[in-house]
Amino acid sequence: MAGSARVAAATLITALLATACSQGSATRTEEPAAGGKVTLRYFTFSAAPDHVKDLDTIVAAFEKENPTVDVQVETAPYDQYFTKLQTSIAGQTAPDTFELNYENFVTYAGAGSLLDLGAAGGDTDTSGYATESLNAFKHDGKQFALPASFSTVVLLYNKDLFEKAGVPLPTADWTWADEQAAAEKLTDKGAKVYGDFQPVTFFEFYKALKQAGGEFMSGGKSTFNSPQGVKAAKWLVDKVGKTMPTEAEIGGTADFDTNLFKSGKLAMWHNGIWQFAGLKDVPFEWDVVVEPGDSQKASAVFHNSVAASATTKHPREAYAWAKFLSSSNVAATTRIASSWELPPVSDQAVLQGYLKDPVPANRQAVFDSLKSIALPPVIARQQEMQDAVTQELTEAAAGRKSVEEALTEAASKVDALLG
Amino acid sequence: MTLTETPPKAPARQPVRPPRKRLRYALTVAVFLLPSAVPLLLFTLIPMAGSLWTSLHEWNLITPMKWVGLDNYARLLASEETRAAFGHTLYFIAGYLPLVYAGGLGLAMLLNRAMRGRDVFRAIYFLPVVTSWVVVALLWKWLLNPASGIVNWAIGLIGLEGPGWWTDPGWAMPSIILASAWKDLGFVMIILLAGLQAIPKEYVEAARVDGANAWQRFRRITLPLLSPSTFFVVVISLINGFQVFDQVHVMTGGGPAGATQVVVEQVYNLTFKYGRAGEASALSWLLFAVVLVVTLIQVRGQRRWVNYG
């Protein structure tokens, strides 16, 4: 029976172990007598693997300005990041400062895990930030995190494939119908070339829904099971197996779409501007446009912020680092020079630097995409909602349910989560 | 397994020891027990008590716990998902147990004969048992890849189209059962092999002289005399079956469409994905209760069929 006891205990063992170890990390963050240097831990998902060096540049500049602070960077891939963060908070070994995305910010701020940076800094100069970005990370009127970067989703396309197939290149005026017609012409199953790739997920769905003129929820109830919702879901689901590989063909391969695009076998790819750096050396011409819409344009925007733990022993240093990482000139220019998302700064001159890089040529599309954005719906039980919607849409994509059935089911699950 | 044995009875007349000697004796016993008692306490009993406490709270890992009494249990018992998770776990056991037992028995019988390279084969079949589950699960995921796996390639050679394996809700659980049985085959084989070797050759000889054919010797001599080993294998495999997690987590993550959402995978998701650690702890205790009841039934039932000859 010892074995099943292990399972019964599995949930807590981590927390207890972590508590046992917290002694160790407490000494780690304490100020050593000699030298008087403060070690400040920073946990991030967006730096690894492509931008660790860029983060190091920012850290070095910060440490030069603040010689008494030693910033220790810890990274984790996005899909493990929040599990690790939660566990470390539960085990009282939370990093002093850490990255949070917009979708998760509400959960953490509401849970009281975050330090009120406004109070910690005692410095009210926020003129360096774009106001909308700053406001996105306020909770109950308090600034619990500082916006550090943002990114948008655009339509990346392989110019060579378009020219070879004699299909006109995508423009900012394209609608779904144009994209679909082109995708059909560009798909060549014999050569394993696909016309389009747009994941069938919650994130694509809420955006497509807005593009179709629908709304995800309103007044505490889901409203996506509507004619617009059906249209948006069909837009995603109908590509699978026609202009896009099926789930079985993808076979759970990590970064399947990235590799497909890089190998020159994908004509159009719905993905984020964080892909730019990784596409530097591909042997074909590629460019971007604002995503086609249906009844209207809507582009997904992802916001990342830097927050400090409510339990940090160094609130002032944490604030200084958060501020430096989010709004200093070094941070902003480093991000822009390496195409590591965009800094949420108000200084347009700094942002214009983003356009200097010649690849992709139409970088202006990134700024254009910000003119009409779709923010993800955020609820307290966020992850469950995302999983429920993605799972139902996947069912429809695999042909195991009709789109209508899937949406009805998803709506009832989301309504249950909204309680 | 402690349940199967009654504690050894103290001898009727204990030798009388002087108090000091008795103290020394107790200390000696304590010293020898310490190495296993301390980890058991630290890593099993204390966390178990902790999870019982957690199961009475609402806790998302990042906010302080909130007392909710038995609400978590009530909600779980009423929920469709709990029923589905236990259903999937039972499906796994129903496929896994017969397969691993029959396969292990076959191998044990085969490798119980005098043959060349017997030890090498025994070692080979035992190899998966000592391999990490993550490695084995990734290997099978790769072998059974619907698009590029070697299994579907081989099926394609004879002109058929292989199934979607772990991407198809109907095939996902069979895929996991297959991988699990493959890995645990060696363990069952070793236990049964030991059991087979403990059967005196004279019994089989005598049966042969009396004119029993191979099937009759197997059915009437080998199987009954193997029953203690069989009992052990069934109890262990059932407990392992109820706790199935690693292979599911790596191969399907509970998908596709929740078709392999077993109980422990559900515990993991509730805690680490959905921040419902209280419910997850309660679910762990429900699983504990089920395993306890099933094991007690087995211990009771063993008198009917286990032969300690």
Image (cartoon, grey):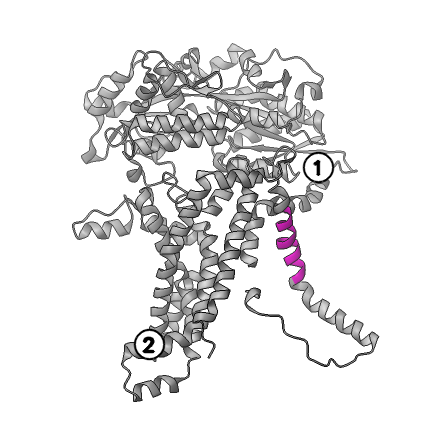
Q: Is residue A306 left or right of residue B169?
A: right
Which residue is rendered at x = 44% and y = 47% of the image?
B86
Find out whether residue B43 is within the magenta segment: yes
Read off the residue under disc 2: B218
Query: Would residue A408 be seen by someone viewing this image from the given angle?
Result: yes
**The disc labelled 2 sits on which kind of residue?**
Phe
Q: Secondary structure at mark 2?
A: helix
Query: Up-down: is B184 above or below A95?
Result: below
Read off the residue under disc 1: A29
Query: Would residue A280 be seen by someone viewing this image from the given angle?
Result: no
Q: Is residue A125 left or right of residue B2?
A: right
The answer to which of B156 and B213 lies nearer the viewer is B213
Magenta residue span: B37-50
Q: Secondary structure at mark 1?
A: helix
Q: Is residue A326 left or right of residue B183?
A: right
Which residue is rendered at x = 63% and y = 18% of the image?
A143
Q: CA distance from mark 2 to mark 1?
A: 68 Å
Query: Up-down: is B117 above or below B168?
Result: below
**The disc labelled 1 sits on which kind of residue?**
Thr
Q: Residues within 10 Å of mark 2 (few under 14, many from 20)?
A: some
Residue B6 in the image, given as x and y percentages of width and height? 59, 70
* Chain at tag 1: A
Residue A223 in the image, given as x and y percentages of width and height? 41, 18
Residue A328 occupies quadrant? top right
